[in-house]
Amino acid sequence: MPELSRSQVVAYGAVALALLLVGARAIRSEGGAGPAPAAAAGPAAGSAELSLSSSGGDVVVDVAGAVRRPGVYRLPAGARVVDAISRAGGATGKALLEGINRAARLADGQQVVVPERGPAAAAATLGATSEDGPISLGSATAEQLETIDGIGPVTAAKIVEYRDQHGGLSSVDQLDQVSGIGPATMESLRSRLQP
């Protein structure tokens, strides 16, 4: 058998290292196929405390609402809301998928809430709005939001953008994170919106 030169040994070593890294990543991603373990209320005696901190660029998200297996899941960095829904077993028959942006990128610690269809949500989806009736927060358009006192086109667009970036909203109170919404506007929103 011929002698290998130093450059050949280095090249073969680099290829072997690359294959090991790819294999380790594949094994790690297969291990994350289920829900991430949730931290217990307190560590058991003599055991290490579980941590949900993301490592290696992964994100940990809470998937709730109209999905088959709600829970906390670890997904690779760059994953989308649709990936989180899929990891949670997919949407149920009652899910109002039009109410969330399934293409939005996930952020570590984010909660993805898949809204359920209901009488008010169905009316909002069909574009039927009443001046007195509540508007569905999960599916309201910018035009529907503009019908609320104190909400203009700019603020309505910010609300829709915030909802899309965060994979939906489960509470009207989350809107206090949107710039331009003060205490008086929050009261108007509470009276006219429903989750």
Image (cartoon, helix red, strand yellow):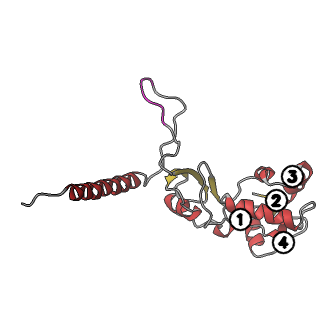
Residue type indicated by callout 1: Gly
Residue type indicated by callout 3: Met
Residue at (61% x, 67% y) in the render: 103
Tell how many labels.
4
Residue at (38% x, 51% y) in the render: 28
Q: Which class describes the residues within 10 Å of circle 4: few (<14), some (14-19), or many (20+)?
A: some
Q: Is residue 137 among the parts visible in the rendering? A: yes
SS at circle 1: loop
Q: Which residue is disc 3 drawn over? A: 186
Q: Which residue is disc 2 drawn over? A: 193
> In front: 1, or 138?
1
Q: Which circle's residue, 1 or 3, is located before the other in the chain?
A: 1
- Residue at mark 1 to residue at mark 2: CA–CA distance: 14 Å
As drawn, is 30 to the left or to the right of 5? right
Kindly report which numbered mark, 1 or 3, lies closer to the viewer in this rendering.
Answer: 3
Q: Which residue is disc 4 drawn over? A: 143
As drawn, is 10 to the left or to the right of 143? left
